[in-house]
Image: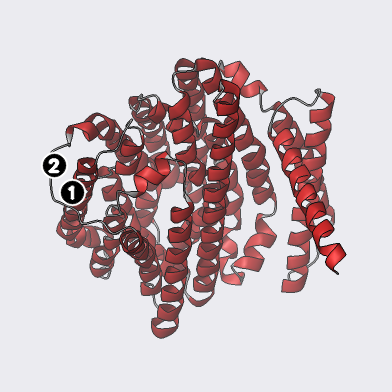
Amino acid sequence: MRPGNEAAVLAHNTAFSGALMVLARLISRVMDLLTMLILARLLSPSDFGLVTIAMTVILILEAALEMPLSQALVRLPEIKESYYHTAFTLGLLRGVLLCSAVYIIAVPFASFYKHRELVPLIEFLSLAPAARGLLNPRLAQFAKDLNFKYEFMFELIGKLAAFIAGIVTVFLTHSYWSIAVCTVAAPLVIAAQSYALFPFRPRLTLVDWRIFVDFLGWISLSQIVLAINWQSDQLLLGKLMRPAQLGLFSLANNVTNIPLSSLFSPLLRPLLSAFSMLREDRTRLQNSFQSAASAVIAIGLPLLVGQSIVAAPMVRLLLGQKWLGAIPAVSLLSLSLIPLLFGMLLTPLSMALGETRAMVWRNVLQMCVKLPLVIVGALKYGFMGVIAARIISETITAVYCMVIIRRLSGLSVARQLVSCWRSVAAVAFMAVILETFTSYFDWGIAPPWVAAQLGASVTLGAAAYTSCLFLLWRIEGRPQGLETLALRMLARLRQRLVRTAGIVTPSA
């Protein structure tokens, strides 16, 4: 196959795999959101705050014992049978260590926060990360081949099971246990499916542990630091504030993160596979990275800015009156995520190039900047101080990421920024239009009017952004980018519709 055709096939496979994973994550996150909205209507902020405190220790321990075994296998030129057995054994050991650590610290942790009910809650929640670590290692071969259809299916069935389990539990108990059951059900069902569909009788062995050491060492350290970064504010707020106040902040944090994680988290694995294939060709790697990074900005930036502007009607409609205190947090937390977009793809790039220590130094820098700011901010200004600390630390971290990307790929920081200028300009135009619209049109607080205002704002914002983006694209001479890909997809869709109409019409 010629290099040009090979590149086209790789780009198509990567785009298709990414689209499939995004679709799976979108559907699953919609189910997460629906579950969260139902639970928010039936439970109180205190319930969410209590589960948030419990989940912080679980997430930090999960990160401390993180073993991205599938990613390590994907990078290997060939996956031998013995590698699968070693990967399973490492995952099993991780689960045992994690659950043991949770049981050891559960009582002192609950005593520190003065909530005895945290003990059984923490112990039960530890089943979720343990199940995630026991996923069938044979799925790594499918990821290596950019075939994610089975993960697509597993994700949807797991989320559906979690939704049903959570809703049934909340109607039976009307307690925070419904959130815990929902959290644990999905990974358990996903892991069970992976072995049911692809039978695998693991043999306990560590014979090939050395092939995972270099990769997992830096990744694990990076995950520990990252978890401390993301959970430190909630750990501190959990001690300083009542569970109800923490519940407001936690739900606001979840609401703002759902769209971003739904769209971009699934893309990291296909991009890891694609960058791994291109690591010997510097030029093609640069072009592939820049196209992906520009697409992340073009999609993520209007999403976050728009979400910030329409926070009030969104919270009123989705969560209800008892959650109105979360509106400022939703608005500002959305803006705090913007810098993340500019350095997000350092993760798959550094993993593909075997430079995982870059992720560690990124997270260490972020922790050194964020922790002092979070402590001072939380003690003096509460929620707002924590959000300000996030914005400052994320901005500094994004600049650092772009510098490291320059070292790894050869793309200058200026080139990384210039490639997304159209998106930035179009978002500025969209923000002006939306702010003007929301300032002059207050449709009241009745649910039908709030829904109409939210729908009109989203439609207006999408139209303003898209029209401005395509206008700037045409002015610039129609360069290759997300706009080109979108038009090609629309053209193909139109051709299929015309072809389908041509087939159906004669028979009619």
Q: Position of residue 328 (x, y in %)?
A: 60, 53
Taking the spot 56% from the left edge, 31% from the top edge, the residue there is 342
Categorize mark 2 by other alpha carbons within 10 Å: few (<14), some (14-19), many (20+).
some
Dot 1 amino acid type: Thr
Taking the spot 52% from the left edge, 54% from the top edge, the residue there is 25
Horizontal arrangement in the rendering, residue 246 relative to residue 66 (left or right): right
Task: Compare residues 96 and 69 and report the one nearer the observer.
Answer: 69
Dot 2 amino acid type: Leu
Residue 206 circle label? 2
Residue annotated with mark 1: 89
Q: Residue furthest front?
A: 507
In which quadrant of the rendered image does the N terminus lie? top right
Residue 310 against residue 110 in the figure, above or below: above
Q: Position of residue 104 (x, y in %)?
A: 14, 57
Q: Position of residue 27 (x, y in %)?
A: 55, 60
Residue 362: quadrant of the picture: top left
What sort of colour scheme is used for the picture? secondary structure
Label 2's element?
A: loop
Q: Is residue 446 visible?
A: no
Task: Compare residues 131 and 173 and report the one nearer the observer.
Answer: 131
Q: Position of residue 411 (x, y in %)?
A: 55, 17
Residue 107 against residue 415 in the figure, above or below: below
Badge 2 or badge 1: first in the primary sequence: 1
